[in-house]
Image (cartoon, rainbow, N blue to C red):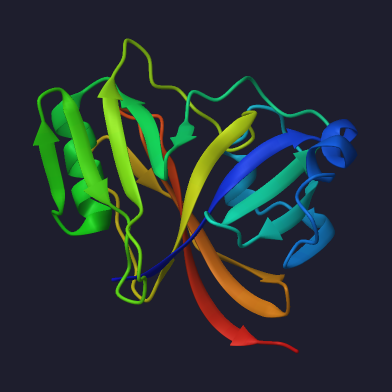
């Protein structure tokens, strides 16, 4: 079950950090040289051992992540509170989304639409996938990328998708068990987070 939508990532290079963060004010928290999980490295275009993380609540919770060498420009966009991505196979992409969002997926002409809203969220977090010839993505691609969801159960991947093993990491004083789900039919990668316990 999805408890709440946590954030979307925004990826950039460490050399861009100061300019990018200059107008955003103070982050809710930040971590420098945070180790990358093994499962995450397997989904990266350019292998990196660590990253810098700055979390901003704002109107749309965003986790700014900085690498020495980020990947190519992402095709994921965030516009008017809606995340847009792509799919190459509608039925496989639908099955992938339904495995995460419990069948709450609608078909609007060529678009697949679902809500990423969890049971504790007050606002909606829509996701729309549109058809494309290619739908390739990596967690370190530049720009908007990975939606992260707080969950309280384990997930398994449908055919044509993968769910990585869960790994534990401490972020902002919390022990988190994190895994990733990715489909070969869509360019959206999800981060699924279980909060293990507070360490502070």
Q: Nearer the viewer, residue 137 or 40?
A: 137
Q: Is residue 124 above or below residue 29?
A: above
Identified at 37% across, 43% down, the residue is: 162
Residue 8: in sight, yes or no? yes
The quadrant of the rendering that contains the C terminus is: bottom right
**Relative to the observer, which residue lies in front, 25 or 49?**
25
Answer with the quarter of the image where residue 150 lies: bottom left
Horizontal side, residue 168 vs residue 103: left or right: right
Q: Is 190 above or below relative to 73?
A: below
Residue 158 shows up from this direction: no
What is the x, y in percent for residue 56?
Answer: 67, 59
Front residue of 122/34: it is 122
Furthest-top residue in view? 133
In x, y percent, where is residue 118?
32, 68
Q: Quadrant of residue 1?
A: bottom left
- Residue at 10 percent across and 35 percent down: it is 107
62 to the left or right of 134: right
| Residue 14, horizontal then vertical, whole percent | 86, 37
């Amino acid at each position: 079950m999805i408890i709440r939508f946590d954030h979307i990532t925004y990826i950039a290079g460490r050399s861009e950090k100061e300019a990018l963060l200059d107008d955003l004010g103070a982050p809710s928290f930040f971590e420098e040289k945070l180790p990358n999980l093994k499962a995450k490295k397997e989904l990266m275009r350019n292998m990196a051992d660590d990253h810098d993380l700055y979390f901003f609540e704002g109107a749309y919770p965003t986790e700014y992540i900085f690498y020495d060498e980020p990947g190519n420009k992402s095709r994921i966009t965030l516009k008017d509170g809606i995340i847009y991505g792509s799919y190459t196979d509608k039925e496989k992409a639908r099955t992938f989304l339904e495995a995460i969002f419990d069948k709450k997926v609608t078909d609007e002409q060529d678009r697949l639409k679902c809500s990423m809203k969890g049971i504790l969220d007050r606002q909606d977090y829509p996701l729309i996938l549109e058809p494309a010839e290619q739908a390739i993505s990596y967690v370190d691609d530049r720009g908007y990328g990975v939606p992260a969801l707080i969950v309280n159960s384990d997930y398994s991947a449908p055919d044509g998708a993968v769910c990585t093993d869960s790994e534990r990491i401490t972020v902002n004083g919390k022990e988190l068990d994190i895994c990733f789900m990715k489909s070969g039919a869509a360019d959206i990668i999800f981060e699924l987070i279980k909060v293990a316990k507070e360490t502070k």
